[in-house]
Image (cartoon, helix red, strand yellow):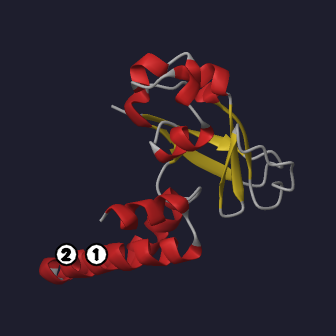
Amino acid sequence: MCMSNELSCICGKERINFHYGDSILPEDVIMAVYCPECSGIDFNPSTMVKDNNWVIEYDLDVARMFANQMRIKKEDITSDFIFDNNYATWNGYTPNDLKSSAKEKTELLELAKIDKRRYLSEIKNWTENRLKRLSEEGWRKAKSVLAAA
């Protein structure tokens, strides 16, 4: 089971849904989130991850307390490791993926009421095309999924 929560970026303009894979890390592992408007900060790659123009700042001391549960040595825990292994990351491919994907699927849901076979084909195409588009836009998780395929 995984937990999730919603946080505001530093400037307060955006609300972001986060996913905590395997519910290992607590919510306070994320120290701050910076949207493109508030991300004009001194980027510290040892504690931060950049995904497009978004930045997540992690508390690595908190994360290292859970090293055994993540099956990794404390000294090997990095911000990239946390993000790329889904221990504390966007809930979806982008910071607002839950909202944007739901909005995009609305039209397809109408088709499901009329022609289920066509709906299944269309939702498959939509998913594949969306993943490619997000990867081309530079979203880290989408690029990772495509690279693994």
Q: Identify the secondary structure beneath mark 1.
A: helix
Rendering coords of residue 144 (x, y %):
44, 60
Rendering coords of residue 70 (x, y %):
42, 26
> At 59% across and 55% down in the image, what residue appears?
95
Rendering coords of residue 117 (x, y %):
13, 80
> At 86% across and 48% down in the image, what residue appears?
42
In this rendering, the answer to whether 55 lies above or below 128 is: above
Q: Residues within 10 Å of mark 2 (few under 14, many from 20)?
A: some
Instruction: Find disc 1 in the rendering and name its residue.
Output: 123
In this rendering, the answer to whether 56 lies above or below 58 is: below
Verify CB contact (< 8 Å) between mark 2 and mark 1.
yes
> At 62% across and 20% down in the image, what residue appears?
62
The image quadrant where one finds the N terminus is top left
Rendering coords of residue 67 (x, y %):
48, 21
How far apart, in angstroms, are the residues tagged by discs 2 and 1? Answer: 5 Å
Q: Residues within 10 Å of mark 1 (few under 14, many from 20)?
A: some
Which amino acid type is shown beneath numbered disc 1?
Answer: Ile
In this rendering, the answer to whether 65 lies above or below 17 is: above
The image quadrant where one finds the C terminus is bottom left
Instruction: Find disc 2 in the rendering and name its residue.
Output: 120
